[in-house]
Amino acid sequence: MSPYDPSAFPPFAVTVDLVVLTVRRHALCALAVRRGEPPFQGRWALPGGFVRDEEDLTAAAARELIEETGLCAHDPLAPVRDNGAHLEQLATYGDPKRDPRMRVVSVAHLALAPDLPAPRPGGDAHSARWAPVEALLKHGGYGREDEQAAPLAFDHAQILADGVERARSKIEYSSLATAFCPPEFTVGELRRVYEAVWGVALDPRNFHRKVTGTPGFLVPTGGTTTRQGGRPAQLFRAGGATLLNPPMLRPEA
Amino acid sequence: MSPYDPSAFPPFAVTVDLVVLTVRRHALCALAVRRGEPPFQGRWALPGGFVRDEEDLTAAAARELIEETGLCAHDPLAPVRDNGAHLEQLATYGDPKRDPRMRVVSVAHLALAPDLPAPRPGGDAHSARWAPVEALLKHGGYGREDEQAAPLAFDHAQILADGVERARSKIEYSSLATAFCPPEFTVGELRRVYEAVWGVALDPRNFHRKVTGTPGFLVPTGGTTTRQGGRPAQLFRAGGATLLNPPMLRPEA
DNA sequence: GTGTTTATCGTCAGGCAGACGACTATGATC
DNA sequence: GATCATAGTCGTCTGCCTGACGATAAACAC
């Protein structure tokens, strides 16, 4: 076989699919769109679309993110935390049978966003919504029995599971959990992010000691807020540190 | 734009590239092949090739691995450690300009192998060899000045750097370092793997305590060996544990 | 035997995490 | 305005793990 013969290659379609995660009402939620066309018409799926000619993979993912949510992708190298989302490549899925129509290789991306008021069904999807990841993984996002309970389209359940696992493990050793928070947030709000993503309860006192004691993780802004009720809490911004050493330990049980 | 119109998609070529790592003579080495055709003719590159029709991405990577090294890919789920290599997906590289001829998306894979006697230049490459990763990253693998010192072809230097970083971080919290070892090995041999991959010196006594004290990491076979000289050392096989908790800490300096 | 090499066991101090007590500052309720 | 509920913040104590390092054991070379 010729190693790199550009004139004789099997043609593939390349798409990007997005696992967009946020924390809403103490639950880890993902963005799902309802498919308006076959295959899997009417089923829920991850947002995504074709990579365009002359378009980088990350650019395609950022474009889809804007189209679906209005969120700007947050450049990981940018020093200032705007209102954008964290975006990174997740993995690539290329089973020959994953799309019944043709050979499609999908480069999945993971996006982490602060809580958004409402999903903006922009672009092509008939509708879009946030749904708890457990519900999406178990029966396509429906909790009530009277609605159809079909699994996600294509191999999107696998992609979503991989994205959730990536997020769960990555907030252990990085400051990525702040991507779920608004630009200014309290220690308690950050703790609730960890609790929602991991699905556990954390000791508020030990958590406070840990995050405030890790250099570069949190920067106090000077302000306080009582939006969570109770005693006013200090407001923080995400510090420059991206890697937490030693890491935040996830309880085993 | 139509979200999933299979008849109107820009065609891509999809390839797999391999970062094959091993430890030779106390150094982390990667497999490099010399390109026999333009572009980048005569330059060193990572092994790889087109994904075939009806071929899964992992299958394509495993096929390339066999063609280039004779190594069988080690199924991560297989309980018994044969002489195969660990193989996992690394990342996907799709810059529109990464191949000057056409749009090529490459799904890079990372393979970890025990020390092999000699690279087997099979398949298409004019020649193949192991080279220390530092040399490959700095000047394409040549240490002497009188030979050409061109960087790796395409974006392979970036891919190699990402693969090395993945390996360096992953042996921290997983038992993956045993993939660099033969089926039976000593604690000292495993320690030399860590030292080569990380480029540091580790305390033999603390290392011994750590690896033998982590349940499921190492299983004694009962035999001993003196192949490293000195006092006979116990032989171990890799245990069933894949995740190390608490992790093996990489020295910071 | 003596020296060298490698493996293995022990000891000790410092750091960090989990468990939990105590106190503080707000809003809600009566 | 007193009381309560809520949430935040500071401390203490204990156990585990790690890093530094001493000491011993078992092979080989000469």
Image: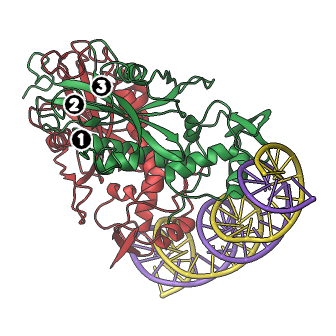
Chain colours: A red, B green, C purple, D yellow
- Disc nearer the start of the sequence (3/1): 3
**Is label 1 in a helix, a strand or a loop?**
loop
Q: Which residue is mark 1?
A: B155
Report the residue at 52% width, 30% height from top: B116
Disc on the earlier residue, 2 or 1: 2
Question: Which SS class for mark 3?
Answer: loop
Q: Which mark is residue B105?
A: 2
Label 2, secondary structure: give it.
strand
Q: In the rendered image, which residue does mark 3 sit on?
A: B126
Q: Residue at x 71, y 39 (%)?
A: B227
Q: Give residue B29's position: percent from left, percent from top.
A: 44, 41
Specify the amino acid type for callout 1: Asp
Q: Chain of mark 1?
A: B
Q: Chain of mark 3?
A: B
Residue B69 badge: none
Compared with B132, A35 (above or below) is: above
Residue drawn where x is 67% and y is 40% of the image? B217
